[in-house]
Image: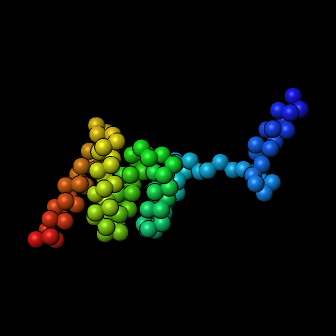
Amino acid sequence: MVVLAVFSAVALMGGGGEIARAAPSPDAHLRQGIALYNQGRYAQAVEAFRKAIQADPRFSRAYAWLGLAYVKLNQPRPALEAFRKVVEIVPNSEDARVARQWIKRLEAQLMMFSE
C-alpha cells in the first residue's frame, strides 16, 4: 500500500521534482485557435490549429479552421490542403460540404492566376 502511494507520487513528479502537467487537449488548442482567429490573429491561429492536429491527426474540425485561417492569410495552397483533409476524414459531414465549396473557390482562384 505504501509502495503504491510512493509510486503514484513519483509518477506525478517531473524531472525537476515538479508535478507533471497533462498536455492541452486538441479541443483546448482548437478553442484557442478560434479565439485568435476571431481576434484577427490568423498566423497565431494557424499555430494553435496545427497543435490541435498534432495532438489528434484526424481532428477534422481543426483542419477546417486551419483552412479558413490560411484563406485569411491569402495562402490558398495550404488552405486547399487543409480543406481536402476535411473531405478525406469526414466525407459525408457538413464540414466536408463546406470544405468542398472552399476547394472549388480556391481552385478557381488559382486557375485564374496561373493563366
| Residue at x 19% of width, y 65% of height | 110
Residue 42 visible, this orientation: yes
**Residue most toward the right?**
2
Front residue of 107 and 8: 8
Counting labels gives 0
Q: Is residue 106 left or right of residue 50?
A: left
Left or right of residue 40: residue 108: left
Location of the C terminus (image quadrant) = bottom left
Q: Residue furthest top?
A: 1
What colouring style does the render use? rainbow
Give the residue displayed 52% in from the left and 53% down from the top. Answer: 29
Q: Nearer the viewer, residue 25 or 3?
A: 3
Q: Position of residue 82 (x, y in %)?
A: 34, 54
Left or right placement of residue 24 versus residue 49 in this view: right
Residue drawn 82% across the image and 32% down it: 4
| Viewer-proximal residue among 21 and 42 | 21
94 or 77: nearer the eye?
A: 77
Residue 21 image point, x, y percent = 69, 50
Q: Is residue 88 above or below residue 68?
A: above
Rendered position, 24 above or below 36: above
Residue sitting at the far left: 115
Q: Position of residue 66 (x, y in %)?
A: 39, 57
Residue 32 is situated, as x and y percent measured from the top left of the image, at: 52, 57
Q: Can residue 94 be seen at all in this image of the molecule?
A: no
**Quadrant location of residue 106?**
bottom left
Q: Report the quarter where the N terminus lies.
A: top right
Left or right relative to 46: residue 6? right
